[in-house]
């Protein structure tokens, strides 16, 4: 599970992160620590994104964030925790950190940044002054158990194929069609009814109880993923990552390919796909060829 511990300097983020590590285990990563993963920043960011995605269903990674840009590195399914403290407490802690001296420019900087994260969307808010870390860790334990048991991932039967295709059309229409010309949207619609194209695909689905909420379809011989969609109401809950991990169980160590839409490109990069060519347009469909090297 990935926990984003987000807040201003001296709000209590690091203390909370340490308490979570003591109670739940895992690894703490702070700010730009990920730069140690590679010589170039772009490669380090790519490797770090992949590491976070792979941790969604694994051991805890506790990412301590004080920069708004770093919030964007958190993958779908990460738990975002805002840690807050009043301005006077932040100033007192910063003064102690600077051995009793708080220069006026630093004080002004703290004042300007105060509340910088307040408008974001978070799963939890923690009081970095008076919050009970022990009780909060218990909440996180229950949250992890709940998330792991919320959804079922399995192969789909032939009888379930049409439901998967219907879901693909709904999600495509809402999230991907806006990036395409009318020709591209019509081309995608036609492929959903083309038995020659659909023949031989194997489908995997994610279920909330009996409801299909996500799908992957792969052409086994070519190891090429043709459809990869998650119901918009379930985005950012790690479902796409979980489906892909289930797929990898049946294709261990294999190289998989897909053609990414503009909308899906950041997600595919985050789970380990890399572009193999520049964006192309065929029959109105915009796509970037990508591959995943199995490990």
Image: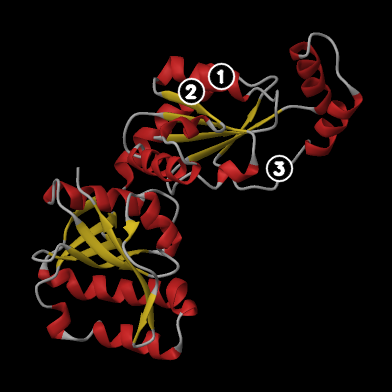
Q: Nearer the viewer, residue 171 or 116?
A: 116
Q: Position of residue 65 (x, y in %)?
A: 59, 34
Tell me the mark number nearer the camera, choosing from 3 and 2. Answer: 3
Q: Are marks 3 and 2 in contact (CB under 8 Å)?
A: no
As measured in the structure, the alpha-carbon distance from the residue carrying label 3 to the one carrying label 1 is 21 Å
Q: Give me the C-alpha separation between circle 1 and circle 2.
A: 6 Å
Q: Earlier in the sequence, mark 3 or mark 1?
A: 3
Q: Residue at x 41, y 30 (%)?
A: 142
Of residues 169 and 8, the one drawn nearer to the viewer in this rendering: 8
The residue that label 1 is drawn on is 133
Kind of element beneath mark 1: helix
Residue at coordinates 42% horizontally, 33% vertically from top-left?
A: 37
* Nearest-to-viewer mark from 3 and 1: 3
- Circle 3 is placed at which residue position? 118
Outermost residue to the front? 39
Labelled pair 3, 1 in contact (Cβ < 8 Å): no
Q: How many marks?
A: 3
Q: Which residue is mark 2?
A: 137
């Amino acid at each position: 599970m990935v926990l984003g511990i987000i807040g201003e300097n001296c709000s209590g983020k690091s203390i909370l992160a340490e308490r979570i590590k003591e109670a739940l285990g895992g690894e703490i990563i702070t700010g730009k620590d990920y730069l140690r993963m590679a010589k170039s920043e772009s490669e380090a960011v790519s490797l770090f994104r992949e590491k976070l995605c792979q941790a969604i269903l694994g051991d805890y990674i506790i990412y301590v964030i004080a920069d708004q840009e770093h919030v964007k590195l958190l993958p779908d399914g990460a738990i975002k925790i805002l840690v807050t403290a009043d301005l006077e407490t932040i100033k007192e802690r910063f003064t102690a950190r600077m051995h009793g001296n708080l220069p006026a420019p630093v004080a002004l900087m703290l004042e300007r940044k105060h509340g910088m994260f307040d408008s974001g969307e978070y799963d939890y808010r923690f009081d970095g002054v008076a919050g009970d870390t022990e009780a909060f860790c218990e909440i996180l334990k229950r949250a992890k158990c709940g998330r792991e048991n919320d959804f079922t991932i399995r192969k789909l039967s032939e009888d379930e194929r049409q439901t998967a295709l219907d879901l693909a059309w709904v999600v495509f229409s809402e999230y991907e069609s806006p990036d395409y010309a009318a020709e591209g949207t019509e081309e995608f619609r036609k492929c959903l009814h083309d038995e020659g194209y659909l023949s031989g695909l194997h489908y995997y689905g994610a279920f909330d109880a009996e409801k299909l909420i996500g799908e992957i379809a792969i052409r086994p011989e070519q190891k090429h993923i043709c459809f990869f969609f998650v119901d918009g109401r379930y985005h950012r809950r790690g479902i796409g990552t979980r489906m892909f991990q289930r797929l990898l169980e049946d294709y261990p160590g294999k190289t998989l390919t897909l053609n990414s839409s503009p909308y899906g490109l950041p997600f595919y990069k985050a789970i380990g796909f890399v572009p193999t060519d520049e964006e192309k347009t065929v029959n109105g469909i915009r796509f970037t060829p990508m591959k995943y090297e199995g490990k």
